[in-house]
Image (cartoon, rainbow, N blue to C red):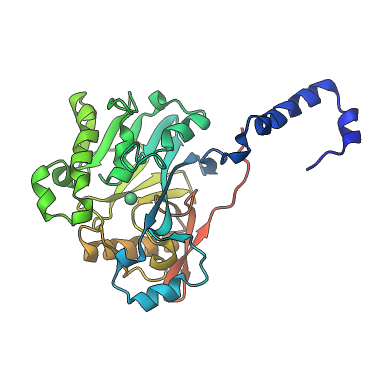
Amino acid sequence: MILPASALRALPLPALLAIAPLSSVSAAGAADAQVPGFQRHDIGTLRVTALFDGVVALPRQQLHGLAPGQVARLLDGRYVPESADGLQTAVNAYLVERDGRRLLVDAGTAQCFGDALGQVPRNLAAAGIDPASIDDVLLTHAHPDHMCGVLAADGAPAFANATLWLSAADAAWWLDPAHAADAPEMVRPAFAMAQRAAAPYAARGRLRRFSPGDALPAGVRALDSRGHTPGHVSWLIDGGADAQLLVWGDIVHYHAVQFARPEASYEADSDPAAAIASRRRLLAEAATRGWWVAGAHLPFPGLGHVRRDGDGHAWAPVEFAPVPR
Ligand SMILES: [Zn+2]
């Protein structure tokens, strides 16, 4: 809406004062800045805040199981931004507020992927959330784009009062340097990063290595979705009838390809066959049950639904809307 000058003259003084900060923003040079990277959505009784960490470039050559021509055809007309380094891929984390409890699912890259990423802390601040108010950090897996963000720049826990939940299988793998030699070369730096991130929580008795069947925060289940990592889990959070939210982690890296062709795997997968099986199972289950989905590497805010599309599936993104106060 643009107000004509005559309308401005007619406005009472308080209204003019309320307009003033808008013009001072552009005067301060903020016209070059992006809007803060957070977005709130109410899903049943859950309030979900998507938090943007930045983007990475994933080369199409690291997508395996399809011929390059098939990949090119799937990407054709999808307009995914692509540089010489690869296809633009978002990194997202999710704050879920449930029944007075604040759950953060994954935490972004912090310093691990350079200065262009690591935006979760600033976006959490922009959303008005105090990191000390987070009760639980639920990790989908121990890769640095999900786990480095549990640390502040000084190496202390970024979430001073939170319990850090990591699956026992991922903890056993990534917190043991002896396994690095057996891992794909591109993920070997992840071992040291995971150990560094977990250490201050473990030292404070706040690292919980959970196994299937263990008690978890109320309303939360960890679904085994191993393959991308040995202990990858997807978090199913109960928001009441018709409001189940699956924060699925790294089930899809190449959204323009893997919804349609889940048999395409990613070079960083620990066990490509298991990753493919997990992707097929969760795509089908999310579509059949109508679950909400939050995806760490889907275009921000990465919230929406999975729908069937021919022999495969497709992504139906959320629509932006106000949230009730
Ligand atoms: Zn990831």
Rendered residue at 26%/56% (across/down): 228
Q: Residue furthest top?
A: 13
Depth order, front residue of 41/156: 156
Q: Residue furthest left?
A: 178
Residue 116: name its quadrant.
top left
Split into 4 quadrants, where in the image is the N terminus?
top right
Figure quadrant of residue 24: top right
Work out whether residue 139 can be spotted.
Answer: no
Q: Position of residue 290 (x, y in %)?
A: 47, 58
Please tell me which residue lies in front, 8 or 116. Answer: 116
Going 41% across and 72% down the picture, which residue do you hit?
312
Q: Say whether residue 175 is left or right of residue 9.
A: left
Give the answer, above or below, for where 237 lies relative to 89: above
x then y, percent, for residue 91? 40, 48
**Residue 211, horizontal then vertical, whole percent:** 20, 44
Count all numbered tags in the image, as a single digit: 0
Please indicate whether residue 226 sits to the left or right of residue 307 in the image. Answer: left
Figure check: 302 above or below 265: above
Residue closest to the eye, 173 or 281 = 173
Residue drawn where x is 59% and y is 52% of the image: 319
If the image is split into quadrants, where does the C terminus sit? top right
Which x, y percent locates residue 245? 43, 48
> Up-down: is 81 above or below 69?
above
Q: Is residue 225 visible?
A: yes
* Left or right placement of residue 163 versus residue 301 in this view: left
